[in-house]
Amino acid sequence: MTALVARPERVRLAGQRHQATVVTHQRLMLIMLLFLGVTAAVVLRIGYLALFSDGAARGGAANALLPARGDIVDRNGQPLARSIDAWTIGVHPAKIIGDREEIAVRLARLMPERSAAEYLEILTSGRTFQFLRRRALPELVAAVNAIGEPGLAFDREPDRLYPQAGLGAHVLGWTDIDGHGAAGMEKVLDAALTDPARRGAPTALAIDSRVQAAMESELAAAMTSLQAIGATGVVLDVRTGELLALASLPAYNPNAAGRFALDTRFNRATMGVYELGSTFKPITVAAAMEAGVIKSLGQRYDAAHAVAVGRFRINDSHPIGRSITIPEMLIHSSNIVTARISDQMGAERMAHAFRQLGFDEPAHVELPEKGRTLWPGDWGRATIMNTGFGHGIAVTPLHLATAYATLVNGGVWRPATLMKLGPDQVPRGRRVYSEETSARMRQMLRLIVTEGTGKKAEAPGYRVGGKTGTAEKPKDGGYARKSLVSTFAAAFPMDDPRYVVIAMLDEPKGNAETFGIATAGWTAAPVVSKVVSRIGPLLGVLPDERRDVDVSDLMPLIWKAKGAR
């Protein structure tokens, strides 16, 4: 029998296959070891960070998911401004492969802010990249993408959204195209809102969006009805200086601030400087009481005869024809008596009284948009008398709000603030009036509403007190008799004041409802009444017609015609 002998070539092939198998196994083992090594390194790194890194490092991944700019909320946590992801549309001109002229035409149809020629210039420029639209809507992105050109680029970037649209626009301001604060509190808080240590933490303002909405809607209704060119309103906490509402009309939508006219971005509450007329009279009275010029509210002044100052004469719009007491002067809003009191005060004491209220400098508030007051350069006798009833000196409505807070809160002036304050953050302020003077002013402001020119500001159960102010606007070295600034400055409830409410209408026109009258008692005072009735319950001030300021000791000082109530 013949023995089987393996052929040499078969032995060589078997050896080669074995060697290849060994090499393959070695390579697989090496790859597996490398994979395990990388995995182990990642696990060890994560473990190290978990054990030894600080909270900021551990939160890095989570923070990367948070918006780059913190939210702004109202005092109750309602969002006023927040960051979202938005679309951008761009182009890489050098990478365009389609017909540039056709693409330019289609882009011009979709984004008409540029012409087809301008788009063609961009597409043929050879640039590396150029934005075509930022903050683009998803619908536009889809339409541009449908052009099918690979050289067009789409990306996401943070954008600022104002979910309440135009509510509080002049307070919030807006951000520029690069996401930085350009105006309002967005500009003021820019560093805080972009601070990496605070990413994701909202910033609370003092504004109450419900109060702001009530003020804006009532001002808008009055502005439309009375054909005014503008309006402004303020709601201020008299104990803290916090601004619960700061409104200016006409307004704009900060989601598209650049599309609105420049005048809509003018903040009348802090930039508008006005002669605010008779709203200054209670301030003059309080200053005279502090100075000892008014020693008794029963002091009588001649209101029957005009006051002559050089070639000018100061008269009352509704002549009283007799001597009157201090409460009567405020109830009837006598220019004549206010001028006499101011004359007794003199330049030094009148200027000091206004400086104590900050009338010689821009309003004390965080906003960068502030107007410089018109402070008299010459405190001659005519100036002294005129400033006593709000002429010859011009301030903002916010100045007036802080002054009235001082009148009614016990006599302490505090700066206004748009930041929500904690109990330990309320500034001490500075004392301007004594507690006694403030108590007397509360009585007399209440009498102006119950007995005087402010009757239409009454809101049943809320014990409103305040003062009308109607001033002619300066024009060509004199005054325009039919261009009025009508203001009502109020506080409520007067037996325990909590809030100041200012309403001002710029050039209102009388209508059938006001019998053609455009003065503050018929135009601005009703706005205050409606605002107080709406915001009182929101702020925890419930109507109570059983309570009121005790004015019984002042009633004998007020003359009433026979048969009057």
Image: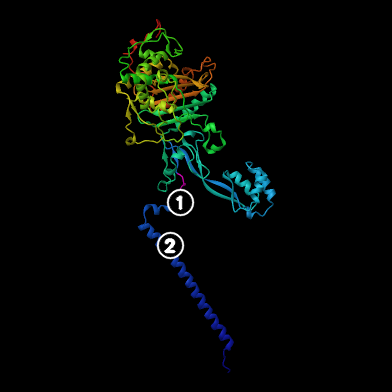
Q: Is residue 77 above or below residue 319?
A: below
Which one is closest to the eye, mark 2 or mark 1? Answer: 1
Residue 355 horizontal/vertical position (percent): 37, 27
**Residue highlighted by disc 1:** 64
**For this rendering, which residue is in front, 366 or 55?**
366
Q: Is residue 314 above or below residue 355?
A: above
Would you say 181 lies left or right of 139 here? left
Disc 2/disc 1 C-alpha distance (Å): 20 Å
* Amino acid type shown at disc 2: Val
Single out the residue that lies furthest toward the bottom: 1
**Residue highlighted by disc 2:** 42
Q: Residues within 10 Å of mark 2 (few under 14, many from 20)?
A: few
Report the residue at 68% width, 53% height from top: 98
Q: Quadrant of residue 296?
A: top left
Q: Main secondary structure of the magenta part?
A: loop
User: In the rendered structure, are the residues bearing label 2 and label 1 in contact, judged by CB atoms less than 8 Å apart?
Assistant: no
The label shown at residue 558 is none
* Amino acid type shown at disc 1: Ala
Q: Is residue 88 above or below residue 348?
A: below
Q: Residues within 10 Å of mark 1 (few under 14, many from 20)?
A: few
Q: Label 1's element?
A: loop
What sort of colour scheme is used for the picture? rainbow
Q: Tell me the quarter of the image containing the N terminus.
A: bottom right
**For this rendering, which residue is in front, 281 or 190?**
281
**For this rendering, which residue is in front, 156 or 480?**
480
Region of the chain picked out in magenta, as a range = 63-69
Report the residue at 36% width, 14% height from top: 327
Residue 123 visible (yes or no): yes
